[in-house]
Image: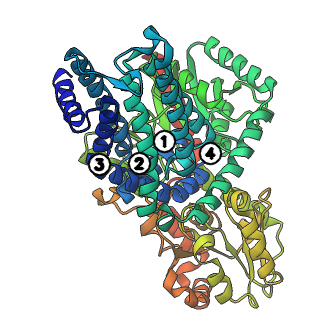
């Protein structure tokens, strides 16, 4: 820092020799530093524009993954890579300003030691205001005022700062003004003058950059405002929901947390993220309860989970919210922990720090490829995986063989509780359905909730080309899509009124079971529908959802890709006009008969109809073994 002080002292001295007035020398010095650092300021301006250009996309995935911090972070990281954005560049001006300030402080003290006159309009700039008082106190006041003006103008006109929330703006303003006043009081007045000059030149430079590199020429502000409105609406709804979390729920969570820990060591614990997840565990849990007196502990992070309506012997339920769950997982004491949540140990949820012998079991809630639709290391820290079928088992095994995974897995040939339950429900519904050979066949369109899904990319092309005179067509959007884009659904319903039914009530799955054909994109409903009803699927090749971009490291082809043209037909976006022909093929080709689809199901899914007993038997066996250890 002493060398920096010598350099800045020398530079200030040069400016002083040119002007022979110490105050104006500081203004000249500050101006020169702004000129020298102009390329950095231009770089920051361009980087800020790049950031704000990303905001609409960023806001949209914040809407899409609302509440899922891990997915939002992952999407943001990918977005930064895609646009080659460097967040750290925005810190460069702050770092440079601090370095300059420290250098100027040292430089001014060097000049003071040399006895150079430091008067400016009658003010001795070598004085420290807090000590000397008098007219010199005007310097820190002007420093604070200049910081206030700079913050106000930046909040209005700086390309990045103007898009920040009011809270961030006020925090920056308060810190900047307070720091300027505080520093101005305790350092020589010349440094305060440098601070004033720097703030004024920063304001001028900001408007100059906005003129020559106009953000409005690069940023779609209409799209930005639309995305902000979508996110604001969702945040307002979430805030209202949070407020609706009653004091009773908060007290209940606290009581359940204590009650769970008071139980001490438990044999088996199931964890459910939210309401509706019990269906994944149902058959396995019911088998254990029916065959043993093992006590099951069931944690849910949803205070309104329907699980609390169930009353079963040896079945204890607890409401533990997301934040408390993080600590609870670290304190967990149990023989076995069963969950459908991937990425154990990778994000918030960790393996227990207290009980190192817990066997963590992953139970999948769909039959899709974990290699394709999860992060590549999402299952690495589980001890046991219940695999849905040969493809699922093969890819996990291959990953273990190719890479140095932390835990060698126990792979159980399990099946799919979802397909088993859907199959049972379908058979029950069809018992009560009258069959009429002359009745019109029905087609269900059920898109995913991923980027560029059918509703975002080609729904009107499909509906304009499908034979609605011959078939009954129902569009069943993903519930999240309805939540965020209900207006769009209503607009489509009005346009195709009388020809197509749009379903927004998801209280019943009857439309899924009774449909003669499904049209979807990359939704997991495709295989659930095909393998439970033994009916074909028409796949629209929208952009594929790839969570793990390195999925091709494994030679095992994901079921999502391999079975696509076995349980149905794929149609590219460019060939939507061929949809009539594709529909006829699916209804008439022998490879889509009930018998053929049943053969495919047995090829891809383990233990159809009995996954619950398979899972239950394994867990009982392991608990017996652990009791003897």
Q: Residues within 10 Å of mark 2 (few under 14, many from 20)?
A: some
Q: Residues within 10 Å of mark 3 (few under 14, many from 20)?
A: few
Q: Is residue 371 visible?
A: no
From the image, tell me which residue sits under label 4. Answer: 280
Q: Disc 4 vs disc 2: which is toward the camera?
A: 2
The reply to whether the C-beta atoms of the residues labelled 4 and 2 are less than 8 Å apart is no
Mark sitting on residue 35: 3
From the image, tell me which residue sits under label 2. Answer: 375
Rendered location of residue 128, percent (x, y):
40, 14
Instruction: Point out the residue furthest to the top here.
Output: 131
Q: Secondary structure at mark 2?
A: loop
The reply to whether the C-beta atoms of the residues labelled 2 and 1 are less than 8 Å apart is yes
Rendered location of residue 583, percent (x, y):
61, 85
Mark 1 vs mark 3, CA separation in Å: 53 Å
Q: Secondary structure at mark 3?
A: helix
Residue closer to the observer: 98 or 350? 98
Q: Earlier in the sequence, mark 4 or mark 2?
A: 4
The reply to whether the C-beta atoms of the residues labelled 3 and 2 are less than 8 Å apart is no
Quarter of the picture containing the C terminus is: top left
Mark 4 vs mark 2, CA separation in Å: 21 Å
Instruction: Decide if residue 9 is on the left or right side of residue 329.
Output: left
Q: Residue at x 82, y 81 (%)?
A: 497
Q: Secondary structure at mark 4?
A: helix
């Amino acid at each position: 820092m002493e060398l920096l002080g010598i350099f800045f002292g020398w530079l200030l001295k040069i400016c002083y020799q040119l002007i022979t007035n110490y105050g104006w020398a500081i203004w000249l010095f500050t101006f020169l530093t702004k000129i020298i650092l102009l390329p950095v300021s231009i770089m920051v301006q361009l980087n800020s524009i790049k950031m704000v250009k990303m905001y609409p996309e960023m806001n949209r995935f914040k809407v899409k993954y609302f509440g899922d911090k891990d997915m939002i972070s992952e999407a943001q990281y990918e977005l930064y890579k895609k646009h080659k954005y460097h967040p750290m560049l925005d810190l460069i001006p702050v770092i440079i300003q601090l370095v300059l300030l420290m250098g100027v402080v040292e430089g001014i003290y060097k000049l003071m030691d040399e006895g150079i006159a430091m008067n400016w309009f009658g003010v001795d700039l070598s004085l420290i205001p807090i000590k000397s008082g008098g007219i010199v106190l005007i310097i820190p006041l002007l420093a604070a005022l200049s910081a206030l003006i700079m913050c106000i103008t930046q909040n209005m006109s700086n390309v990045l700062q103007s898009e920040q929330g009011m809270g961030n703006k006020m925090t920056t303003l308060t810190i900047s003004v307070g720091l300027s006043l505080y520093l101005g009081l305790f350092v020589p007045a010349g440094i305060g003058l440098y601070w004033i000059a720097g703030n004024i030149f920063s304001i001028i430079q900001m408007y100059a950059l906005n003129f020559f590199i106009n953000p409005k020429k690069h940023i779609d502000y209409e799209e930005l405002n639309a995305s902000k409105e979508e996110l604001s609406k969702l945040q307002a709804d979430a805030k209202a929901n949070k407020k609706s979390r009653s004091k009773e729920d908060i007290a209940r969570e606290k009581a359940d947390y204590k009650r769970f820990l008071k139980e001490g060591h438990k044999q088996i614990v199931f964890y459910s993220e939210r309401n509706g997840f019990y269906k994944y565990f149902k058959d396995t849990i019911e088998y254990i309860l029916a065959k043993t007196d093992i006590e099951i502990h069931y944690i849910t992070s949803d205070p309104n989970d329907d699980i609390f309506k169930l009353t079963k012997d040896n079945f204890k339920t607890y409401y533990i919210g997301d934040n408390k769950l993080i600590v609870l997982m670290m304190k967990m004491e149990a023989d076995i922990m069963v969950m459908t949540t991937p990425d154990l140990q990778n994000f918030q949820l960790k393996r227990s720090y207290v009980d190192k012998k817990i066997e963590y079991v992953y139970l999948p809630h769909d039959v899709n490829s974990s290699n394709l639709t999860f992060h590549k290391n999402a299952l690495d820290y589980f001890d046991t995986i219940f695999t849905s079928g040969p493809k699922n088992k093969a890819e996990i095994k291959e990953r273990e063989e190719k890479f140095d995974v932390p835990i060698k897995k126990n792979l159980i040939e399990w099946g799919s509780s979802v397909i088993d339950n859907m199959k049972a429900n379908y058979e029950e519904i069809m018992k009560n359905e009258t069959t009429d050979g002359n009745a019109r066949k029905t087609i269900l369109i059920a898109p995913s909730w991923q980027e560029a899904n059918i509703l975002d990319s080609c729904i009107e092309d499909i509906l304009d080309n499908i034979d609605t005179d011959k078939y009954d067509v129902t569009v069943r959007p993903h519930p999240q899509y309805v939540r965020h884009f209900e207006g769009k659904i209503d607009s489509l319903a009005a346009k195709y009124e009388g020809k197509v039914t749009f379903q927004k009530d998801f209280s019943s799955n009857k439309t899924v079971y009774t449909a003669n054909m499904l049209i979807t994109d990359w939704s997991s409903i495709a295989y659930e529908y095909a393998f439970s009803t033994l009916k074909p699927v028409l796949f629209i090749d929208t952009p594929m959802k790839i969570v793990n971009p390195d999925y091709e490291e494994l030679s095992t082809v994901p079921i999502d890709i391999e079975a696509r043209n076995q349980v149905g037909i794929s149609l590219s976006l460019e060939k939507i006009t061929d949809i009539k022909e594709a529909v006829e093929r699916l209804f008439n080709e022998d490879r889509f008969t009930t018998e053929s689809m049943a053969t495919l199901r047995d090829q891809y899914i383990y233990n159809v109809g009995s996954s619950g007993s398979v899972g239950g038997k394994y867990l009982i066996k392991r608990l017996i073994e652990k009791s003897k250890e």
